Image: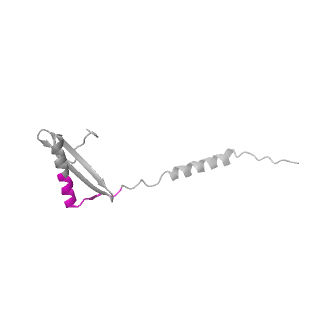
Amino acid sequence: MKHRVRKKTTGAKGGLLLAAMVVVLLLAGCGQPAASPPPMAEVEPELAQALQDTLDSAFEASGAIGVSVAVIMPGERLWTGVSGDSHPGQPVTEEMLFDMGS
């Protein structure tokens, strides 16, 4: 009984196959970048005022110098509020950066 021996794919055919695989893999990674999520909707004015009033009351009771809060609600709604000063005479603003938990 004769056994068939399969030759290895080498040389030009093997190199071409390898090059084709590399091109396919490179093209697979060249998709469009992920789109940015749409901006979050602001909360209703009445709810925003109630949240700010609650923040102001908690801030006054805490004895803290200044506070900045962000609340993300289901349905992609966002509320941000600030109260107090970051430094004497300089009010906290929504654009100020704080260390987390500071």
**Image position of 42 with respect to 65: above or below:** below
What residue do we see at 27% from left, 52% from top?
A: 71
Q: Can residue 86 be spotted in the picture?
A: yes
Residue 23 lies in the magenta stretch: no
Q: What percent of the width, then of the height, locates residue 17?
A: 63, 49
Where the C terminus falls, by quadrant?
top left
Q: What percent of the width, then of the height, locates residue 45?
A: 20, 60
**Image position of 65 with respect to 55: above or below:** above
Choose top left, top right, bottom left or bottom right for residue 39.
Answer: bottom left
Find the residue positioned furthest to the left: 89
What residue do we see at 21% from left, 57% from top?
A: 48
What residue do we see at 21% from left, 54% from top?
A: 51
| Nearest the eye: 72 or 50 | 50
Name the side, left or right, on which 11 lies relative to 19: right
Q: Which residues are magenta?
A: 37-53
Residue 47 lies in the magenta stretch: yes
Q: What percent of the width, then of the height, locates residue 84?
A: 15, 44
Counting the numbered discs, the total is 0
Name the side, left or right, on which 67 lies relative to 11: left
